[in-house]
Image: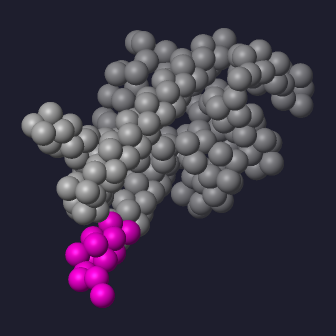
Amino acid sequence: MTAKRILLGACAILIIIVTPWFLALTTLFPLISPYFLRFQYARPDVPPSVRFSPQERQAFAEAAAHYLVSGEGIDYLANLTDDEGTPLFNERELTHMVDVKVLVGQAARLDIVLGLLLAASLGIVISQPESRRRTPFYLLLASLVAPALAITALIVVPLQFRWFFEEFHHIFFVGDSWLFPRSDTLIQLFPEQFWFNALQAWLLLVIGISVLIGLGAYVWRRRARAPSN
């Protein structure tokens, strides 16, 4: 009996802790899509490219996004050229894109692990009568943690976005391998304002889904506590 209580308690803790991280990783991937790119480039605060037309910029950005989430090798990007036949990406940019793809792959694998862990924990607590009624409470707590962190980031990060942007790259990339001249393709496609907007969109997405989970958990809890006729 004690072992069972420990297991159920551990599962409850995992639900509360894992859910925010699972949401944070899962909501990253909609940002690597043609729809998000189109939405971003339509925003007036994203500066236009001085090298590419809007159509070219969209097409090249979609190619970069496709590379990150597909099984394509780096030759996929290396073979892209502009109208004059000049390679679209230089060697430094290609090396960085390889590094980014590795990071995206690691995030995807971690997301799967967290999703399986969360599903298993939910399955265990729901399967047991003594913990089933408390499951919506665990989800409600989890739905409060994620938006609390996201709202804090929405307030704090814009005040020091450049520092945050640089520190992120220092953590995940080697040296100055992520720094490029403004004329390079990666900067023409993805200027700093693009990433600022992407960060805000990501945090708002986390908040929105957390609110939906919280509302669902609240309704579930109310119904579970309501007297049966």
Magenta residue check for 218: yes
Which residue sits furthest right? 84
Q: How is the image coloured?
A: one colour
Question: Which image quarter holds the C terminus?
Answer: bottom left
Q: Quadrant of residue 60?
A: top right
Q: Does the image show residue 48?
A: no
Q: Quadrant of residue 69?
A: top right
Q: In x, y percent, where is residue 206?
A: 40, 54
Q: Does the image show residue 133?
A: yes
Q: Viewer-proximal residue, 179 or 13?
A: 13
Q: Which residues are magenta?
A: 216-229
Q: In x, y percent, where is residue 20?
A: 32, 47
Q: In x, y percent, where is residue 64?
A: 69, 32
Residue at x-position 28% and y-position 62%: 136
Question: Which image quarter holds the N terminus?
Answer: top left
Residue at x-position 22% and y-position 60%: 134
Which residue sits furthest left? 2
Q: In x, y percent, where is residue 51?
A: 74, 37
Residue 102, compared with residue 27, is above or below; it is above
On the rendered structure, is 2 left or right of 141? left
Q: Viewer-proximal residue, 7 or 190?
A: 7
Residue at x-position 78% and y-position 41%: 59
Magenta residue check for 160: no
Q: Viewer-proximal residue, 206 or 110?
A: 110
Name the main secondary structure of what is drawn in magenta: helix
Q: Viewer-proximal residue, 59 or 221?
A: 221
On the rendered structure, is 28 left or right of 90? left
Q: How many marks?
A: 0
Residue at x-position 38% and y-position 47%: 123
